[in-house]
Image (cartoon, grey):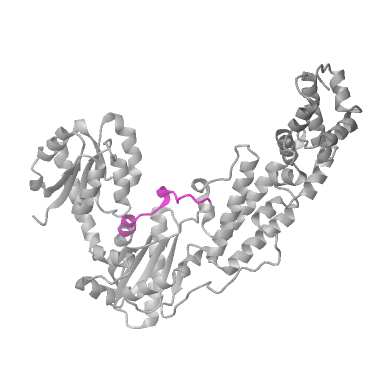
Amino acid sequence: MTDLISVMIVDDEKLMLEDLSTMIDWEAYGYQIIATAFNGKQALRKYREYHPQVIFTDIRMPFMDGIEMISEIRKTDEKVSIVLLTAYEDFSYAKAAIRLGITEYVIKSEITENSLSELLNRLKANIIKAGKRERYITDRMLEQFFLSEEMTESADVEQILKRPEHIIMVEQDLPISLSGEAVPEEIVVHRSKFVEILTNEKITGWDLDVITAIPGRKMVIALSSTESSYGSYEQELYKLARKFQKKLQEETNSSFTLYIVQGRISLYEFKRFYDENKNVFLEKYLEGVGEIRKLDCSQVQELGKEQIVVSSKKNLSMENMLKEPDSQIRIQMLHEILSIARTDGVEQFINAAQAGYTALKHAYEKIETGKEVPRIASCWKEWLDAARITAWLEKQVNHYHEYMTREVNGYSRVISDAVEYICRSFRNPDLSLNDVAAYVHLSPGYLSGEFKRETGVTLKSYLTDIRIEAAKKMMEDGNYKIYEICSAVGYNSSQYFSQAFYKKTGMFPTEYSKKGGRKNEK
């Protein structure tokens, strides 16, 4: 019985569950049904208890549907075979679920004894084939060891962990998320694909002892060799790493950085080095991805702990950089901010780049146009390392300023937005040049000059014109008292309002009101 492939069937229809369980002699085909469940929530609990090798599951179920359940399982288990049971109306939904690693999907109404037996034979052949690969992944406990803080209690695994090996670590080059979104799942190469590619690659002069996953979507390959000299070890190991890298890139169309450990080291020692020196593996984002890098695990390399960001310019920030009108100075500021951060370490560079993205995002939100900064799904290849991120941010900053200087209603975009903001906010008695400048992301001095150049009047004069025109309309309406109008158009002082009104119209408000037919003015 221990050689039988374990199965769990999940369906909220009791009749379907019974039919599938009794349609054929499962044991005759090499299977054993170890659990059934009526919904995804119950199935997830039983999966964690029994760890079946194959799951047959419906899509639409109460409490937790099949897609959500599969998504949860795939977070920790890429090996389990999953067969999706679907109705005709679920067909497009089932196709969309393939990205979660569905082994097969079948239409419920078309399941027969023959089709089910053929399916089980196919699954068994694939599981046996995968099992041959799994001999390289010595034990699930080995992977758990890399995820935990303590040494495993298994004597067999402990012996493997302490055995000196030649080690290559493989890491897919995934983008830094400037926008805070998760990396798109469709671009991620999962563990099962790693194993399939690496174990299918023919190698000579090496025994592939272990392939195991470690946190951060990395794979560790442990090898032994019969070569006699250390020099040839290092040279041949580099050739093998280059071969693995080329094959991975060809099969997945993705970039990979590989690390070669100098000399021989146990997996236990490598984990200790990895846990204490995680910043070492971030350096690729500064120095360039897609390379083969060497690791000296005999030394502790804790990077960037004593470095401090120092800037001689207090106003050097992404927000102020966006406000700078001169294009050359603006780009110089961007590069200086990123250069200072880069000098201080990869984490500081990432923070600075994310601040640049956020500044652009907020700038577009303030002008209320619906335009926004591109998101990770459309430009992840440009977020893979410092050089590409710097170039991308420079391009986006230039796009923003090109957009802001386009003509709208005879004015540049920025002056048009300033005018629109004044027209919307003039009733605020505290509205100032600084407020308008902050809204359009320009310095007050520059906005003042550009506003006068394009409109022919100062911003203050334009604001006064808007307020007086609004006051005149209220007076002509005949239903408001002067003090009510004064407050409604943004003046705290009736005296100041009267002076401004007289300066613009040649009449005081009471005179204009009487001329307009006000009957109740006192």
* Image vertical order of residue 260 relative to residue 76, above or below: below
* Image vertical order of residue 522 relative to residue 432, above or below: above
Residue drawn at (68%, 51%) of the image = 322
Residue 145, given in percent of the width and then of the height, sits at 29, 67
Residue drawn at (77%, 19%) of the image = 477
Is residue 48 or residue 166 the one in the foreground?
A: 48
| Residue 238 visible somewhere in the drawing | no
Residue 189 sits inside the magenta stretch: yes
Farthest residue to the front: give it: 522
In this rendering, position of residue 175 left or right of residue 480: left
Residue drawn at (86%, 23%) of the image = 512
Is residue 122 or residue 515 the one in the foreground?
A: 515
Q: Quadrant of the N terminus?
A: bottom left
In this rendering, position of residue 165 left or right of residue 403: left
State which quadrant residue 332 falls in.
bottom right
State which quadrant residue 432 falls in.
top right
In this rendering, position of residue 324 left or right of residue 359: right
Is residue 66 or residue 114 the one in the foreground?
A: 66
Residue 129, given in percent of the width and then of the height, sits at 22, 55
Q: Report the number of discs.
A: 0
Residue 157 sits inside the magenta stretch: no
* Image vertical order of residue 440 relative to residue 92, above or below: below
Residue 280, given in percent of the width and then of the height, sits at 47, 70
Q: Quadrant of the C terminus?
A: top right
Provide the residue span drawn in magenta: 179-195
Residue 265, given in percent of the width and then of the height, sits at 34, 77
| Residue 479 visible somewhere in the drawing | yes
Residue drawn at (53%, 64%) of the image = 347
Farthest residue to the right: give it: 506
Is residue 39 or residue 113 the one in the foreground?
A: 39
